Amino acid sequence: MPKDRPTKGETTRIAIEDAAMNLFLTQGYAATSMRQIAEEVGLALGGIYNHFSSKEEIFAGIIIDKHPYKQILPAILAAEGATAEDFYKNAAHIVISEMGKRPEFMNLMFIELVEFKGKHGAALLKEIVPKILPVFEKAIKTRKNLRVTNPALLMRSFIGLVVSYLMTEMIISNSILSKLMPKNTEDAYVDIFLHGILKPVE
Amino acid sequence: MPKDRPTKGETTRIAIEDAAMNLFLTQGYAATSMRQIAEEVGLALGGIYNHFSSKEEIFAGIIIDKHPYKQILPAILAAEGATAEDFYKNAAHIVISEMGKRPEFMNLMFIELVEFKGKHGAALLKEIVPKILPVFEKAIKTRKNLRVTNPALLMRSFIGLVVSYLMTEMIISNSILSKLMPKNTEDAYVDIFLHGILKPVE
DNA sequence: CAATAAAAAACGAACAGTCGTTCATTTTTC
DNA sequence: GAAAAATGAACGACTGTTCGTTTTTTATTG
């Protein structure tokens, strides 16, 4: 059954989200006006309100529809076959590199936290968690060399690894600290997650 | 020599920063107006501009003057005497607990990233890094059981640990994931930093 | 201690915009 | 021909900043 071609309304709705996202990312949420969004889409100001009932609703739509986890998730699942060490190493590199390609999305999530205190982020998690958690559950069951056996904790620390790497990268990149960093910081950072900062007892 | 009592201007300047900080934290930066700040201080709108030349300058002043690292730093330095493992465990708990007492400051740094793309954060790092980096340098020199021997990397991953814990805590606290978390997540999280997620090879 | 002059601080009105949202009306799509 | 989409004007309110003026504070004299 061939998919119906999208209606005019659906096309416009997507165009509004695209334009608004670019403006939010480059200028911030509060600094972006509905007039700017309308102009970018090629619409009169009032026309937007046929598709979204408010500025906040546009933002919420973007968070759900445009988050890169939709591209990242299949890549993580494909990395599942290797050893536990390789799996986490590969998965971490995939996520960091995919998110690194779209550093704006970190900004989008920060905007979410600052402007809406996590309201829309919780909705996103509700969608993502059930899809990702089983990956960690399975990894724990099939791999015997994991110290961490709680799936939620493992997942949280994995997300924490990625978030903290990307966030410190953002903070540090303009500062004096970047000169002090070793090359291959990403590898070293992932390695700390895998092996910790301590030598094993001898 | 007794310290001169503060001048009227200094007192007012601090009052403005206090009022503005509370408003920025509860309402966000963009949503807070100069009129609100003035009213909170008990000042006419124009009076603020005798102390700060712009809204952004107020924010920059807050970042420098009010950041809790001034309270946290001495506590970290006091934890220096123990073993490497104890030191990082204690230090992490201190920072997490001190920052946890003021979760608003995470928000303040997010606002900084979103609104000013790290501009004022870099100024803060310039002040903090020279004070903290020696702690990690000394720890590496005097403790032999550290796998990580680059001070900047060790410091970054330590900051990353704290940031990622606090941030995932913020994100998760309203979501379904919080129900799945084990008790003592903070301990377990710090433990992953210390020992990694993998068992040592046997 | 008291009178002073200069500097700092506070006032309050005004400027020149921008903002999100609404709505009756017309046009386009289905 | 009914429903959806687009129009464009209007509303009422709020924005950061400036500036001439008045008041208060501060430091220096007698």
Image (cartoon, coloured by chain):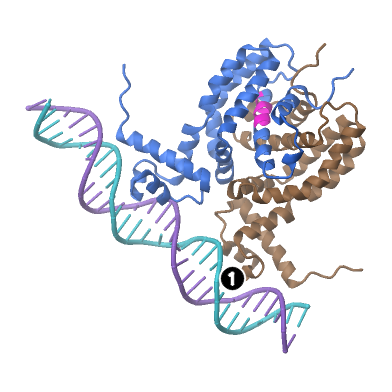
Chain colours: A brown, B blue, C cyan, D purple
Observer able to see residue B69: yes
Which residue bears the numbered disc 1? A46
Decide if residue B156 is on the left or right side of residue B39.
right
Q: What residue is rendered at 58% in x and 20% in y?
A: B76
Observer able to see residue B57: no
Seen from the viewer's position, the closer of residues A145 and B132 is: A145
Residue A11 quadrant: bottom right
Query: Residue A48 at x, y = what percent?
Result: 63, 68
Structural crowding at the residue carrying mark 1, measured as other residues with C-alpha within 10 Å and reported as few (<14), some (14–19) or many (≥20): few
Query: Residue D27 at x, y = what percent?
Result: 22, 28
Query: Residue B84 at x, y = what percent?
Result: 69, 15
Decide if residue A166 is on the left or right side of residue B121.
right
Quick check: is A16 in the magenta stretch? no
**Boundaries of the magenta span:** B155-162
Quick check: is B161 in the magenta stretch? yes
Looking at the rendered structure, the secondary structure element under dot 1 is: helix
Q: What residue is rendered at 74% in x and 29% in y?
A: A189
Residue B82 quadrant: top right
